Image (tube, rainbow, N blue to C red):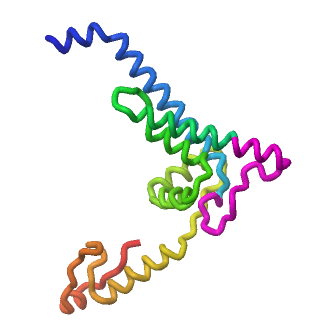
């Protein structure tokens, strides 16, 4: 009975909180979709050079644009931190991510590549881009991915089960000859 009474007293505040949460979720998702659609298809390539933001503009416009983009990114990171606090309605982590995408900070590209390399994220982003008639992202594996694949191949050759990860037990020779081991791709 006490909980129902509390809900009745604070019903308008609860509805406002739910409304702010819903609106911030919708706006955050819209901004994320806009950013994903506007990125170049080769944005996540390792061989891609430094940013090409406003590359076709005069130097003063480019400098103002980069400064504005970084200020907006910084503001969104701070806002996301505030929204992540308990009791504050809103999409804190999503807002922080949007802010980080906008910021020019060292190591940002590597973090972006690690996130986009997750197969589910990569497929979802490319499906979204396809809805807006944009070419899919390209993502070539780099030196570390090649080294990881070579290590996995070597572990299979030595008789470790690749499906069990790094803590895998070595498979006895008799079992190895019964069933061929193949690395999951």
Decide which of 61, 97 is in the foreground and name it. 61
Decide which of 177, 8 is in the foreground and name it. 8
Q: Quadrant of residue 5?
A: top left
Above or below, 91 relative to 162: above
Q: Magenta part mainly helix, strand or loop?
A: loop
Check if residue 43 falls in the magenta segment: yes
Residue stretch rendered in magenta on the structure: 42-67
Apparent side of residue 54 relative to residue 70 in the rendered image (left or right): right
Q: Quadrant of the N terminus?
A: top left
Task: Point out residue 17 in the picture as x, y percentages from the top left corner.
Answer: 40, 20
Decide which of 151, 101 is in the foreground and name it. 101
Q: Quadrant of the C terminus?
A: bottom left
Check if residue 39 falls in the magenta segment: no
> Which residue shows up at 27% across the image and 83% down it?
160
Please give the count of numbered marks on the rendered protein.
0
Q: Quadrant of residue 164?
A: bottom left
Q: Quadrant of residue 89?
A: top left
Above or below, 121 relative to 28: below
Decide which of 153, 75 is in the foreground and name it. 75
> Which residue shows up at 38% across the image and 33% down it?
85
Give the residue at the far right of this rendering. 58
Above or below, 124 relative to 158: above
Task: Point out residue 125 in the picture as x, y percentages from the top left corner.
Answer: 54, 50
Task: Point out residue 163 in the picture as x, y percentages from the top left corner.
Answer: 29, 73
Apparent side of residue 164 relative to residue 86 in the rendered image (left or right): left
Task: Point out residue 19 in the picture as x, y percentages from the top left corner.
Answer: 44, 20
Apparent side of residue 1 relative to residue 59 in the rendered image (left or right): left
> Which residue shows up at 78% across the image and 53% down it?
55
Apparent side of residue 56 relative to residue 101 in the rendered image (left or right): right
């Amino acid at each position: 009975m006490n909980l129902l009474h509390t809900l009745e007293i604070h019903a308008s505040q609860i509805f406002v909180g739910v409304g702010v949460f819903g609106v911030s979720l919708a706006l955050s998702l819209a901004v994320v979709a806009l950013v994903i659609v506007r990125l170049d298809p080769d944005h996540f390539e390792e061989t891609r050079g430094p940013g090409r933001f406003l590359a076709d503009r005069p130097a003063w416009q480019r400098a103002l644009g980069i400064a504005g983009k970084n200020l907006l990114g910084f503001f969104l990171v701070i806002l996301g931190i505030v929204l992540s606090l308990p009791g504050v309605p809103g999409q804190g982590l999503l807002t922080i991510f949007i802010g980080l995408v906008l910021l020019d900070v060292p190591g940002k590209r590597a973090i972006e590549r690690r996130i986009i390399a997750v197969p589910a994220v990569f497929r979802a982003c490319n499906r979204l881009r396809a809805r807006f008639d944009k070419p899919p992202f390209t993502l070539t594996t780099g030196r570390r991915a090649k080294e990881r694949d070579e290590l996995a191949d070597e572990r299979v050759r030595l008789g470790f089960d690749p499906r069990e990860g790094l803590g895998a037990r070595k498979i006895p020779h008799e079992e190895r000859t019964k069933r061929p081991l193949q690395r999951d791709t």
